[in-house]
Image (tube, rainbow, N blue to C red):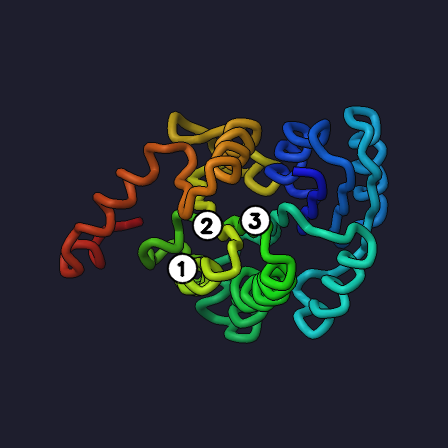
């Protein structure tokens, strides 16, 4: 992997992934909303690798500008060998239930905008005839639960979209990876009580690195979430809807 693009570069998982692969890259483009955090991250990347590092300040929820963003990235780095889409926000489900405008804003951030960005990126990779598109979803997308069904619905939409995109991109030799983390200890989840099912961002980044290298289609990380979610999906609806999940 020579040229790496990270969208949502200041997230905990993105930073852990960058730490793991930066020294293999020649060009790195980092995209996020905060200019200050991007600058700090770029300086850090330059200390751990010899790669040329470029930062772009951009609100990734703004789907109308995704085409311009991908054009700018392509002009900057040429071929995109790997694009990691790693942005979003944990949704306040209680607020969603009483504030439809907020619910739709969150659905756009976690769902619609990711679909738009993935389309623009996959079209560019198809033109190249190569490259990997890795998109972070969530195990929350596997089944709607009362505690986070607005967030889960957005992730479910993304993952269904990626399944179709993956099939479509085969003819262009483009690899599409759906990443489904469980509980990850990052700044975004700092308020949550941690337990045995929680993983570090570095562990998740290691799994992502391996999955991209092996060109896997779907990654549950850590691995045991595949079986936890299989059990959850098998619970009959008349029982499941009564569970306080």
Residue 229, image x, y percentages: 29, 44
Is label 1 or label 3 in front?
Answer: 3
Rounded to the nearest whole Å, what is the CA distance between mark 3 and mark 2? 11 Å
Residue under label 1? 163
Residue 226 visible in this rendered orientation of the protein: yes
Q: Nearer the viewer, residue 244 or 158?
A: 158
Q: Secondary structure at mark 1?
A: helix
Q: Earlier in the sequence, mark 1 or mark 3?
A: 3
> Which mark is drawn over residue 147?
none
Rounded to the nearest whole Å, what is the CA distance between mark 1 and mark 2? 8 Å
Is label 3 or label 2 in front?
Answer: 3
Q: How many numbered marks appear?
A: 3
Image marks 1 and 2: residues in contact by CB distance under 8 Å? yes
Question: Which residue corresponds to the image point at 59% horizontal and 42% vertical from the top-left?
Answer: 188
Residue under label 2? 178
Question: Which residue corresponds to the image point at 18% horizontal and 50% vertical from the top-left?
Answer: 234
Q: Secondary structure at mark 3?
A: strand
Residue 212, image x, y percentages: 52, 40
Q: Is residue 74 left or right of residue 97?
A: right
Q: Is residue 50 left or right of residue 145?
A: right
Q: Earlier in the sequence, mark 3 or mark 2?
A: 3
In the image, residue 49 above or below residue 61 = above
> Which mark is drawn over residue 132?
3
Residue 110, image x, y percentages: 54, 60
Q: Secondary structure at mark 2?
A: strand
């Amino acid at each position: 992997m020579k040229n790496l693009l990270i969208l949502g570069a200041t997230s905990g998982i993105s930073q852990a992934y960058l730490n793991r692969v930066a020294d293999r890259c020649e060009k790195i483009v980092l995209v996020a909303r905060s200019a200050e955090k991007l600058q700090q991250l770029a300086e850090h990347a330059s200390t751990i690798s010899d790669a040329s590092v470029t930062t772009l300040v951009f609100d990734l929820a703004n789907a109308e500008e995704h085409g311009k963003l991908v054009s700018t990235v392509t002009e900057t780095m040429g071929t995109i060998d790997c694009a990691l889409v790693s942005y979003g926000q944990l949704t306040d489900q209680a607020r969603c239930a009483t504030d439809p405008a907020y619910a739709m804003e969150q659905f756009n951030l976690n769902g619609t905008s990711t679909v738009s960005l993935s389309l623009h990126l996959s079209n560019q990779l198809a033109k190249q005839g190569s490259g990997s598109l890795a998109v972070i979803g969530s195990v929350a997308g596997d089944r709607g639960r009362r505690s986070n069904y607005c967030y889960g619905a957005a992730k479910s939409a993304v993952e269904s979209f990626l399944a179709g995109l993956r099939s479509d991109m085969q003819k262009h030799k483009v690899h599409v990876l759906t990443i489904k983390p469980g509980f990850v200890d990052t700044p975004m989840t700092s308020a949550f009580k941690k337990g045995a099912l929680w993983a570090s961002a570095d562990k998740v980044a290691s799994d992502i690195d391996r999955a991209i290298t092996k060109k896997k289609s779907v990654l549950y990380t850590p691995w045991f979430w595949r079986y936890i979610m299989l059990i959850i999906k098998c619970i009959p609806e008349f029982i499941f809807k009564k569970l306080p999940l």
